[in-house]
Image (tube, grey):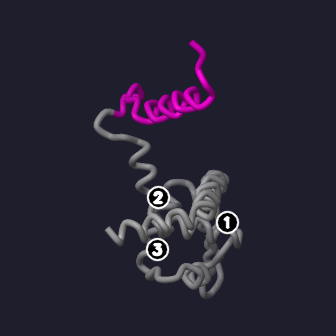
């Protein structure tokens, strides 16, 4: 029996999903993918990564001004998490007052490319999503 391209693609997608939840790495009780996605999958991390990708390097207040609605505390927490995960570097210059700049690491640049693909998908399907929301609200 021949397998069509669409059927073959579904199988590959299922294999990838199954590999995500495969526990042969000995991490039982903790899904590493869930942990990682949870760390930088929130809106503030995504906005921060996108802004740093757009501007290359930014100071804290510049970044805060570019991310509408983020509090100083939330930006601090977000930057620390991204730095801890190796996605952002923080450089302190010995000046008075100290100058601190943030930029994406090579790992952060790789994530940025994935986020841009997601953003392209969202842009391509925005009208379908808005129409679906409107249909749902009318139920």
The residue under label 3 is: 76
Residue 41 position in % (x across, y down):
46, 58
- Observer able to see residue 105: no
- Observer able to see residue 133: yes
Residue 66 position in % (x across, y down):
59, 81
The residue under label 1 is: 53
Q: Residue at x 67, y 66 (%)?
A: 53
Mark 2 or 3, nearer chain start: 2
Residue ranking furthest to the bottom: 97
Is the residue under label 2 in contact with that under label 1 (CB below 8 Å)?
no
In this orientation, which residue lies closer to the viewer: 4 or 59? Answer: 4
Q: Residue at x 36, y 40 (%)?
A: 31
Snapshot quadrant of residue 60 = bottom right
Residue 15 highlighted magenta (yes or no): yes
Q: Which of the two marks, 3 or 1, is nearer to us in this view? A: 1
Q: Is 103 rendered above or below residue 66?
A: above
- From the image, which quarter does the C terminus lie in? bottom left
The boundaries of the magenta stretch are 1-27
Q: Is 68 rendered above or below residue 109?
A: below
């Amino acid at each position: 029996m021949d397998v069509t391209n669409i059927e073959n693609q579904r199988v590959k997608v299922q294999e990838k999903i199954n590999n995500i939840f495969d526990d042969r790495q000995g991490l039982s009780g903790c899904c590493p993918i869930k942990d990682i996605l949870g760390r930088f999958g929130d809106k503030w991390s995504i906005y921060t990564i996108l802004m740093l990708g757009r501007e290359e390097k930014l100071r804290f207040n510049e970044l805060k001004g570019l991310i509408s609605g983020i509090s100083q505390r939330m930006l601090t927490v977000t930057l620390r998490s991204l730095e801890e995960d190796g996605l952002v570097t923080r450089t302190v210059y010995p000046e008075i007052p100290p100058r601190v700049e943030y930029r994406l690491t090579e790992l952060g640049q790789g994530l940025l490319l994935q986020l841009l693909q997601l953003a392209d998908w969202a842009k391509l399907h925005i009208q379908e999503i808005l129409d679906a929301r409107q249909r749902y609200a009318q139920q």
